[in-house]
Amino acid sequence: SGFVGYYRRRLIDFGLARPFLGIAIPITILGAIAANHVPESVLIGAYATLVSVLAVFLSQYWWLSLPSPAPQ
């Protein structure tokens, strides 16, 4: 599978994956439960909001992990 190949080549950033999974797994479970009780448009809106929030969170995490420039 793709995961195994990436894992063997050490291309997975587990430090970045943990926060993502910590949010994605509970939201996935809630979405599966809500799928039968909530209109589709609400689920699509909730998904769009989640993806937007994750994009901001992950980009901030990435920017904070960059090394500081060396003083001149």
Image (cartoon, rainbow, N blue to C red):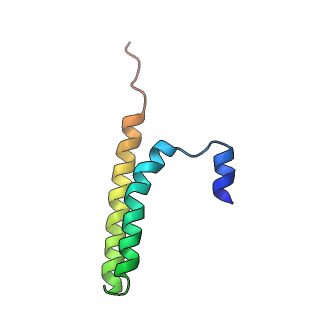
Residue reaching furthest to the top? 72
Q: How many marks?
A: 0
**Residue under the point 52% across and 44% down:** 13
Q: Where does the C terminus fall, quadrant-wise? A: top left
Q: Position of residue 56 (x, y in %)?
A: 34, 52
Q: Is residue 67 above or below residue 72?
A: below
Please tell me whether residue 72 is drawn above or below residue 29 in the rendered image: above
* Residue 32 image-quadrant placement: bottom left
At which x and y percent is residue 16? Answer: 45, 46
Q: Nearer the viewer, residue 37 or 55?
A: 37
Query: Who's the residue at 39% across and 49% down the image?
Result: 58
Q: Quadrant of residue 8?
A: top right
The image shows residue 59 at horizontal and vertical percentages of 38, 47
**Residue for point 36% across, 36% down:** 64
Residue at 33% across, 83% down: 41
Quarter containing the N terminus: bottom right
Residue 63 vs 24, above or below: the answer is: above
Given residues 13 and 30, the one toward you in this image is 30
Q: Position of residue 60 (x, y in %)?
A: 35, 44
Nearer to us in this view, 48 or 4: 4
